[in-house]
Image (cartoon, grey):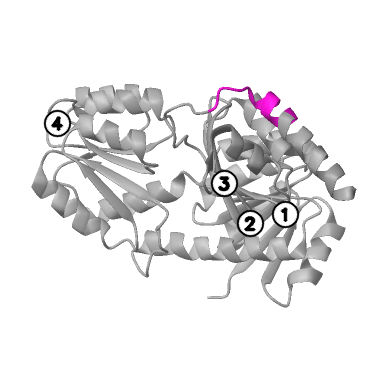
Amino acid sequence: MEHRILFVDDEPNILEGYKRQLRKQYNIVTAEGGERGLDMVKNNGPFSVVVSDLKMPGIDGNHFLALVKEISPETTRILLTGYADLKSAIEAINNGNIFRLLTKPCDRLDLVQALESGIELYNENMSIKTGSGEVRSLSSKKVLIADDDPVIVRVLQKVLRDIPALTVLTAEDGKKAINILDKENIDLLIADIQMPHVNGLQLLSYVSKNLQGLRVIVLTANGSEKIENIIKSIGSYLFYEKPMDLNVFKDAVIRELRSGNTSQIHGINISSFLQLIDIEGKICTLTVRSHGNVGYLYFRNGELIAAETGKLSGEKAAMNIINWNNSVIEIADMCKKNKREIDKPLMKLLMESARIKDEESEAAGK
């Protein structure tokens, strides 16, 4: 299949520029403004990737991509924005409307890499939708199954083994599940309601208080409207009654693992972006990559509670990461750390990091 990519902007000269740059590699379609873009998605789709400018009259890029998500959920959505509009871009990330955030002016190589990743994600989304093809490896993802029924655990483990390189952990009761959640960076919890020591509802309450944003699938052998309402009051969790269709369940697991929809951000100064996270009071985990280095920053309600890179952790790791240049930031909408390891306010860390960077620059210039 030839992948079609839709660029949406209110400036015709910019759209022509995209065509000139990319027409030899991709089938490029353009639309002037959000309304025309929506018409194209509805009547001339499907598009593998939609790239939209943020600032447009009428329907802005954030609202436009939210509507694209409703019309064509398999389509990968990319947002282009200037530094002055980062706050609006954060709103798009919060709403799960985008896969990539690129700042303008955007380097052609960064744009091509984003489009290639977008096409790959579209192919995967279509594979999940149609039940065909292989799912891309989820080797960086961890799933915890909390259930006291060994037969169910073995069945679920067998189903999840079909997902390439996924790490699956198990716990036979809620207490052991909490211990694992405190030690491991779990991306998805699958929890039964009826368990000894700490039951499923108590486990869900713990998650909602301490691991906000963690994706959860709830299982029960004795479903009722009352139980379902209790679960909904604790959090927005998927609910399945045993026995369930295992193929449907497997697809749900894949969607949940993909949906924390990790957004990737290019060309943004780390310090500026962290200040936005602070202002927005966001719950998230940032994965920062720069020149072969990888670091992790953990935020709960806008507060930086932990950081790690290589052998460094806590404040030292945070200040090291903050001073990286030309970074790519991945943002996942959950805090994968429970315990606070950093006590200093973010602004103080940013100021100390800036001072260290200035001192290093002065020393290098002598």
Residue at the image point whose x is 47% and y is 34% from the top: 335
Q: CA distance from mark 3 to mark 1?
A: 34 Å
Q: Amino acid at mark 3?
A: Gly
Q: Are marks 1 and 2 in contact (CB under 8 Å)?
A: yes
Q: Is residue 348 magenta?
A: yes
Residue at the image point whose x is 60% and y is 60% from the top: 49
Q: Are marks 3 and 1 in contact (CB under 8 Å)?
A: no
Q: CA distance from mark 2 to mark 4?
A: 45 Å
Q: CA distance from mark 4 to mark 3?
A: 36 Å
Where residue 147 appears, as percent x and y from the top left, is 17, 39
Q: Element under label 1? A: strand
Q: Which residue is mark 3?
A: 295
Q: Which residues are magenta?
A: 342-351
Q: Nearer the viewer, mark 2 or mark 4?
A: 4
Q: Earlier in the sequence, mark 2 or mark 4?
A: 2
Disc on res. 195: 4
Q: Earlier in the sequence, mark 3 or mark 2?
A: 2
Q: Nearer the viewer, mark 3 or mark 2?
A: 3
Disc on res. 8: 1
